[in-house]
Image (tube, rainbow, N blue to C red):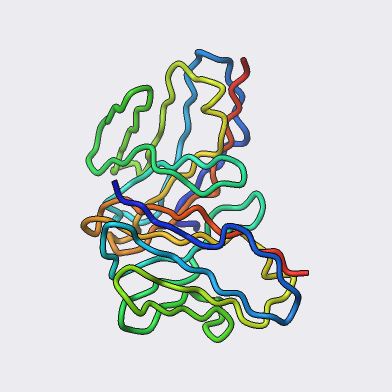
């Protein structure tokens, strides 16, 4: 079945530094990947839609200059949290769709980011 | 109005009983409906999807969709302690590319 691999699973960084999270689709090509963020005891909130070979589409309220998304190949999307602050501490999860538009999203294992 | 609403609080069910979860959505153009299970500290995993009105069964899980009333439900039969998790309802508003998620319902199965 479809598998989405995300790395790292956990990262602790100091305030002001940048963190890169990788999301790979294994055994399938994903022209579109989705980045979600989840704060404790809350639901998943879509941050942005990553499009291979073009600019990402950001949801309202998400700073595109702070959350840099690069989707340079059909199997890899990266999210870079720039100048991280403690309020950016969250669970970041990428996902991709293996199949047509109405098919389910498959999620990576998530990245727990803690900014100290 | 939220795109996807799951309003009931934590649900405690005895082992072997039926757990029933409900979800409503606002966009009548929604075409695909999903239930995900999320264990604490983990990412969501797909357990059911449904596209047409009616019931769809997969093992101990049954999804029910009523597009006229804009709700989708999930039944878990013969609940097991391993079913204790948060269940997320997801919908693709307007049939477009993204999924919108409800806030989830926590289920606790008591042995």
Q: Nearer the viewer, residue B89 or A33?
A: A33
* Residue at the spot 56% in from the left edge and 22% down from the top edge: B81
Q: Going 25% across and 32% down the picture, which residue do you hit?
A: B54
Looking at the rendering, which quadrant does residue B78 occupy? top left
Position of B111 with respect to A60 (left or right) is right
Residue A5 in the image: state x and y as whole percent.
Answer: 43, 57
Please give the name of the residue rendered at 39% of the width and 73% of the height, measured from the top-left corner: A50
Query: On screen, B58 above or below A44?
Result: above
**Residue at screen point 46% across, 62% down:** A94
The reply to whether residue B97 is visible in this rendering is yes
Residue B58: x, y in percent? 30, 28
Q: In which image quadrant can residue A91 be found?
A: bottom right
Q: Quadrant of the C terminus of chain A?
A: bottom right
**In the image, residue A39 lies at what x, y percent?**
64, 57
In the image, A21: left or right of B65?
Answer: right
Q: Position of residue B34 (x, y in %)?
A: 36, 44
Furthest-right residue in this view: A116
Residue A37 visible in the picture: no
Name the side, left or right, on which B49 lies relative to A12.
left
Q: Nearer the viewer, residue A110 or B95?
A: A110
- Residue B76 left/right relative to B92: right
Q: Looking at the image, which residue sits at the far bottom?
A: A65
């Amino acid at each position: 079945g479809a598998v989405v691999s995300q790395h790292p699973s956990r990262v602790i960084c100091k305030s002001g530094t940048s963190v890169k999270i990788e999301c790979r689709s294994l055994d399938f090509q994903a022209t579109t990947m989705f980045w979600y963020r989840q704060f404790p005891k809350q639901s998943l909130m879509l941050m942005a839609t990553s499009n291979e070979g073009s600019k990402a589409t950001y949801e309202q309220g998400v700073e595109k200059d702070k959350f840099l998304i690069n989707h340079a190949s059909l199997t890899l999307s990266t999210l870079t949290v720039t100048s991280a602050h403690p309020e950016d501490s969250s669970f970041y999860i990428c996902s991709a769709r293996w199949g047509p538009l109405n098919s389910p999203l498959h999620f990576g294992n998530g990245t727990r980011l803690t900014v100290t | 109005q939220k795109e996807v609403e799951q309003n009931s609080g934590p649900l405690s069910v005895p082992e072997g009983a039926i757990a029933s979860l409900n979800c409503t959505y606002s966009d009548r153009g929604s075409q695909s409906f999903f239930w995900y299970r999320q264990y604490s500290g983990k990412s969501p995993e797909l357990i059911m999807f449904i596209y047409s009105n009616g019931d769809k069964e997969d093992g101990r899980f049954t999804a029910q969709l009523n597009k006229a009333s804009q709700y989708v439900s999930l039944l878990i039969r013969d609940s097991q302690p391993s079913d204790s998790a948060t269940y997320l309802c997801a919908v693709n508003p307007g049939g477009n590319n993204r999924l919108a998620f409800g806030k989830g319902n926590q289920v606790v199965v008591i042995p």
